């Protein structure tokens, strides 16, 4: 599976999760956070697919934001939703972190 496909899948899952959180609980923070992270993943995926600069970095940023919010909550509450978000964040951190680390350095 290519990096842009991973980014688009994560975009859909995070945005869908935010929308679901809003529908189920009326949580505006879930809606805003899920859609914001989803947009970062989608924009990163688009830039990766179009071979434009900073696509991997945008997707990595989305993974860092998602991990920063979900992993502490998963450890504290041990509920399925934060654990699932943590797994998604970890997948993104690994995929986009490895791509970033292996990019040819300019200079």
Image (cartoon, helix red, strand yellow):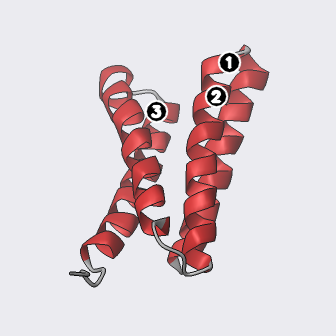
Outermost residue, right direction? 23
Mark 3 or mark 1, whichever is nearer to me: 1
- Name which quarter of the figure residue 95 lies in: bottom left
Q: Secondary structure at mark 1?
A: helix
Q: Which residue is mark 3?
A: 82
The answer to whether residue 85 is left or right of residue 36 is: left
Q: Secondary structure at mark 3?
A: helix
For disc 1, the neighbor class at 10 Å (few under 14, some 14 to 19, many from 20) is: some
Q: What is the distance, in whole Å, between disc 3 and disc 1 at their CAs?
A: 17 Å
Label 3 or label 2, whichever comes before in sequence order: 2
Q: Answer above or below: position of 86 versus 82.
A: below
Residue at the (35%, 74%) spot, across then down: 99
Residue at the (60%, 20%) spot, across then down: 29
Q: Secondary structure at mark 2?
A: helix
- Name which quarter of the figure residue 76 lies in: top left
Q: What is the distance, in whole Å, between disc 3 and disc 2 at their CAs?
A: 16 Å
Mark 3 or mark 2, whichever is nearer to me: 2
Q: Out of 78 and 71, give the one closest to the viewer.
A: 71
Q: Answer above or below: position of 25 versus 8.
A: above
Q: Which residue is mark 2?
A: 32
Residue at the (52%, 33%) spot, across then down: 81
Q: Answer above or below: position of 86 versus 29.
A: below
Residue at the (61%, 78%) spot, across then down: 49
Q: Which mark is residue 107?
A: none
Q: Which residue is mark 1?
A: 28
- On the image, the x and y values in percent for residue 68 come to 34, 35
Contact, mark 2 vs mark 1 (Cβ under 8 Å): yes
The answer to whether residue 14 is left or right of residue 85 is: right
């Amino acid at each position: 599976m290519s990096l842009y496909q991973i980014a688009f899948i994560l975009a859909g899952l995070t945005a869908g999760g935010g929308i679901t959180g809003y529908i189920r609980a009326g949580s505006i923070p879930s809606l805003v956070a899920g859609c914001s992270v989803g947009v970062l993943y989608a924009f990163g995926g688009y830039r990766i697919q179009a071979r434009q600069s900073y696509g991997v970095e945008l997707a990595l940023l989305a993974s860092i934001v998602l991990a920063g919010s979900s992993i502490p909550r998963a450890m504290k509450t041990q509920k399925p939703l934060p654990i699932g978000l943590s797994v998604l964040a970890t997948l993104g951190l690994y995929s986009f972190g490895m791509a970033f680390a292996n990019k040819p350095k300019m200079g």
